[in-house]
Amino acid sequence: MNGSGLHGVRLKCGRNGAGYKVLRVINGSIDAYVHTTRIKKWDVCAGNAILNAVSGQMTTLTGQSLDYSDTQHPQNNDGLLATLRDHTKFLNVFSAAFRNKNS
């Protein structure tokens, strides 16, 4: 991530559930949770609520809030970014990589 302004960022957190990864963002052991494949919204809704309660942010990698009201489409196909701070900076870096991966 040279030149991205994200030098020294902690992202790796292994093969755990989405909720656990969001908690790692909240407790400061990682800087961002990035998910680039399909994920069911019910797998991230609790983490999203907790993150919002502590002034964090979760969006798709296209920068949109997750829409939990659409019961016909329970899957998020647009990647995921969860951060406690610097969300826009992370989004700028990872949304470009996500677009390139999916084009």
Image (tube, rainbow, N blue to C red):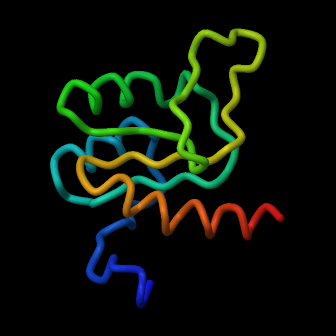
Where residue 25 sits: x, y (%)?
A: 27, 49
Q: Is residue 59 above or below residue 94?
A: above
With 60 as the anchor, is 38 left or right in this view? right
Along the line of sight, the residue nearer the viewer: 20 or 73 = 73
Which of the 4 quarters of the picture holds residue 88?
bottom left
Question: Residue at the spot x=41%, y=38% of the render?
Answer: 58
**How many marks are shown on the rendered structure?**
0
Question: Residue at the spot x=71%, y=40% of the render?
Answer: 77
**Quadrant location, the C terminus:** bottom right
Question: Residue at the spot x=39%, y=67% of the render?
Answer: 12
Question: Residue at the spot x=17%, y=31% of the render?
Answer: 54
With 73 as the anchor, is 103 left or right in this view? right
Q: Is residue 21 above or below residue 49?
A: below
Which of the 4 quarters of the picture holds residue 18?
top left
The residue most toward the bottom is: 2
**Quadrant location, the N terminus:** bottom left
Where residue 61 sits: x, y (%)?
A: 57, 50
Q: Is residue 33 above or below residue 97?
A: above
Where residue 5 sits: x, y (%)?
A: 33, 79
Where residue 57 sits: x, y (%)?
A: 34, 39
